[in-house]
Amino acid sequence: MASKDQHKIPDRIGYYLAGFADGEGSFSLSFRKRKDYSQPWKISLCFNVSQRDKVILALFKRHLKCGTLRSRKDGVWYYEVNNHRAICENVIPFFNQFGFLSAKKKRDFAKFKQVAALISEGAHLTEDGIRRILEIRSDMNDGGARRRKYSDTEIVQVLLQSNVTGKSSETTRQAASLNSCK
């Protein structure tokens, strides 16, 4: 679902931001252990860009109409969007419209969209869905294994120990509210 304001972004700004993200942006996927969650893992998508000058990052926030802009102690600013609805309604339509030139970013974005759709369908709430997400993740960001806190094997082991085989009524409700990325 495209944001109603998506078409109002001037082409020169949209293509500039897409080009900037092509070189400096990242589409990522993380697994976090959660004891307060209906599943052992919370799966989160994130789009982020960081640099020392916050002006361009503020343009992302202004035109995507979502996300947060923060500074680190080392003087680097970062813009990130990790809200699933904002990713589906703002980030994905923006980059669908303005696109990328590099093959690597096109590939990572396509995989990011696949995972967003799976999460919207509720697949992240089942063992089979989590395995599909892990398979997709293995090809994102050049494999990214060096930077991952949990290996695929560890994620599956925890999953099997928790006996996640289906959906509870709560997880079904959560999935139904996320159907905006289909």
Image: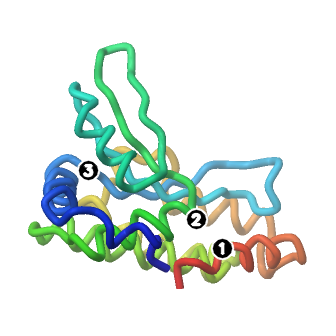
Mark 1 or mark 2: name the one nearer the start of the chain: 2
At 29% across and 39% down in the image, what residue appears?
57
Nearer-N-terminus badge (2/3): 3
The residue that label 1 is drawn on is: 178
Tell me how far mark 1 sits from mark 3, CA to CA.
Answer: 24 Å
Eye-nearest disc, 2 or 3: 2
Q: Count residues near mark 2 (Cα–Cα under 10 Å), then give few for <14, some for 14-19, many for 20+.
A: some
Q: Report whether 67 appears left or right of 33.
A: left
Q: Looking at the picture, how far across and down is residue 134, in whole percent?
A: 48, 70
User: Which sits earlier in the primary sequence, circle 1 or circle 3?
Assistant: 3
Type of the residue with mark 3: Gly
Which residue type does callout 1 highlight? Answer: Leu
Q: Disc 2 marks which residue?
A: 85
Viewed as shown, does residue 174 lie left or right of 151? right
Which one is nearer the viewer's eye here, 139 or 6?
A: 6
In this figure, what is the number of numbered marks? 3
What label sits on residue 90 in the rendered view?
A: none
> In percent of the image, x 24 and y 60: which residue is there?
142
Q: Is residue 148 above or below residue 105?
A: above
Instruction: Give the percent coordinates (x, y) of residue 83.
Output: 56, 55
Amino acid on which the number 2 mark rests in the picture: Arg
| Image vertical order of residue 61 relative to residue 102, above or below | above
Tell me: 32 left or right of 141: right
Q: Residue beneath label 3, please?
A: 25
Question: Are discs 1 and 2 less than 8 Å apart at CB?
Answer: yes
Label 3 crowd bin: few (<14), some (14–19), many (20+), radius 10 Å: some
